[in-house]
Amino acid sequence: MSHIFAIQAMFPVPDGTWVSPFLNSKDSQSDLPFGLLDGFSVAAGVIDPNTRSRIHVMPFVAQVTFVRSGVLIVRTKGPTDTAPRSLRLVAGQAVLTEPGEFFQLVNEQATPTEVLYIVSPAYVFDMGPNGELRFDDAVVLTESWEDLAAADERVRVPMPTAEQRSEALRRIRATKQAASRGP
C-alpha cells in the first residue's frame, strides 16, 4: 500500500500544545483505516513561543520527540529519578520518554518549535461524537513540578487502565469499520 502522508491542520490538545496526528490509525480523529499501522504512530506538533506544556505522563506508550525546527527544553522525571532534569534539544535532535515518565515541553524562544512525535505502540485517542474525550494515552496533570515533589510523585488524578485502553481501541475500530461501509 503506497500513500503520501502529510501534516494536516493542527488542533490544540489538553497539554497546551498543538498536534496533527497525520499517521495514526488508532486516533478517532484520523481518517486512516484502523489496521493500517499497529506498531507505532507519528504526529506533528507545535509548541508556541514562550510556552510550556502542562506536565503529563503516558502509562502505556513510549514517545520519541524529534525537533524539526526551533529549540525545545524537555523536562523529565522517571520513576527512579530523584528530581526532574532538563534536556535542551535543537533541530535534528530527539529525546525518548518511556512509559510512566513525567515530562513537560518548554519553548522559551520567540518563535514556534516544530516537532514530530513517534509513539510506540500507536497512540490511542478517542473522542466521542459530541466532542467528549473518552480516552487519551496522555494523562495531563494540573500539578507543578513542586507539587509533584511535595506529593512524592503520587499523582492524584486517575490513571487509565489497560482495560479502558482496550475498550477505546474497540470503539475506534468499530466506528472506522462502520464509516468504511458507508450508509
Image (cartoon, rainbow, N blue to C red):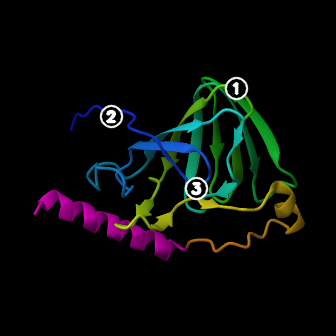
Q: Residue at x 38, y 56 (%)?
A: 26
Boundaries of the magenta span: 161-183
Marker disc for residue 5:
2
Label 1 with label 3: CB-CB less than 8 Å? no
Marker disc for residue 110:
1
* Secondary structure of residue under mark 1: loop
Marker disc for residue 14:
3
Q: Along the polypeptide, which appears first: circle 2 or circle 1?
A: 2
Q: Residue at x 17, y 57 (%)?
A: 180
Pick the quarter of the image with the C terminus: bottom left
Q: Can residue 106 be seen?
A: no
Q: Residue at x 69, y 61 (%)?
A: 141
Place of residue 140 in the rendered image (x, y in percent of width and height, measured from the top left): 64, 60
Q: Can residue 114 be seen?
A: yes
| Image-based side of 94 in relation to 174, left or right | right
Place of residue 120 in the rendered image (x, y in percent of width and height, measured from the top left): 49, 50
Callout 3 amino acid: Pro
* Spatial CA span between label 1 and label 3: 22 Å
- Mark 3 burial class by Cα count in 10 Å: few <14, some 14-19, many 20+: some
Q: Along the polypeptide, which appears first: circle 2 or circle 3?
A: 2
Eyeballing the image, is 119 above or below 5? below
Pick the quarter of the image with the N terminus: top left
Task: Between label 2 and label 1, give the one nearer the viewer.
Answer: 1
Res. 155 image quadrant: bottom right
